[in-house]
Image (spheres, rainbow, N blue to C red):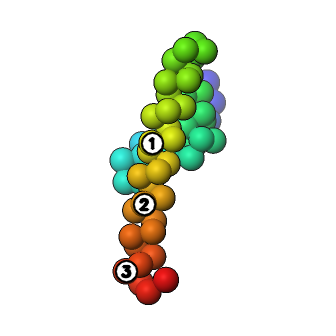
C-alpha cells in the first residue's frame, strides 16, 4: 500500500470539494474528482451533467465579474 498516494488523493479530494463549494469547478477538475471517486457516467447522464456544469460555470463567471467590478475593473 502506497501511503503517499493515498494521502495525495485525500488532499486532492478535499481541496476539490472545498473549491466546488466556494467557486465551482472547471471541467477538468470535475473529471478528476469523478475519477477519484470512481464515478462513471452513462451517455445520458453525461449530457445532463454537462448542462449542470454549464450552469455552474455561468454562476462562477457571474461571481468573477462581480468581484472584478468591486475592485474597479
Residue 36 falls in image quadrant:
top right
Image location of residue 53, percent across then percent down:
50, 38
Residue 28, visible in the rendered structure: yes
Mark number, residue 62:
2
Q: Give the CA distance from mark 3 to mark 1.
A: 23 Å
Near mark 1 (Cα within 10 A), the count class, few <14, some 14-19 or many ≥20, is: few
Image location of residue 54, percent across then percent down:
51, 41
Determine contact: label 2, label 3, CB under 8 Å: no
Q: Which residue is mark 3?
A: 70
* Element on which disc 2 rests: helix
Q: Give the CA distance from mark 2 to mark 3.
A: 13 Å
Picture residue at 45% right of the left edge, 65% below the top? 64
Residue 71 falls in image quadrant:
bottom left
Q: Give the CA distance from mark 2 to mark 1.
A: 11 Å
Near mark 2 (Cα within 10 A), the count class, few <14, some 14-19 or many ≥20, is: few
Image location of residue 56, percent across then percent down:
44, 44
- In this view, 6 is above or below 17: above
19 sits left or right of 27 in the view: left
Residue 38, visible in the rendered structure: no
Determine contact: label 2, label 1, CB under 8 Å: no
Amino acid at each position: 500500500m502506497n501511503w503517499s498516494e493515498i494521502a495525495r488523493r485525500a488532499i486532492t479530494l478535499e481541496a476539490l470539494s472545498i473549491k466546488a463549494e466556494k467557486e465551482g469547478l472547471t471541467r477538468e477538475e470535475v473529471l478528476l474528482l469523478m475519477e477519484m471517486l470512481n464515478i462513471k457516467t452513462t451517455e445520458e447522464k453525461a449530457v445532463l451533467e454537462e448542462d449542470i456544469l454549464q450552469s455552474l460555470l455561468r454562476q462562477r463567471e457571474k461571481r468573477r465579474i462581480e468581484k472584478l467590478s468591486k475592485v474597479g475593473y
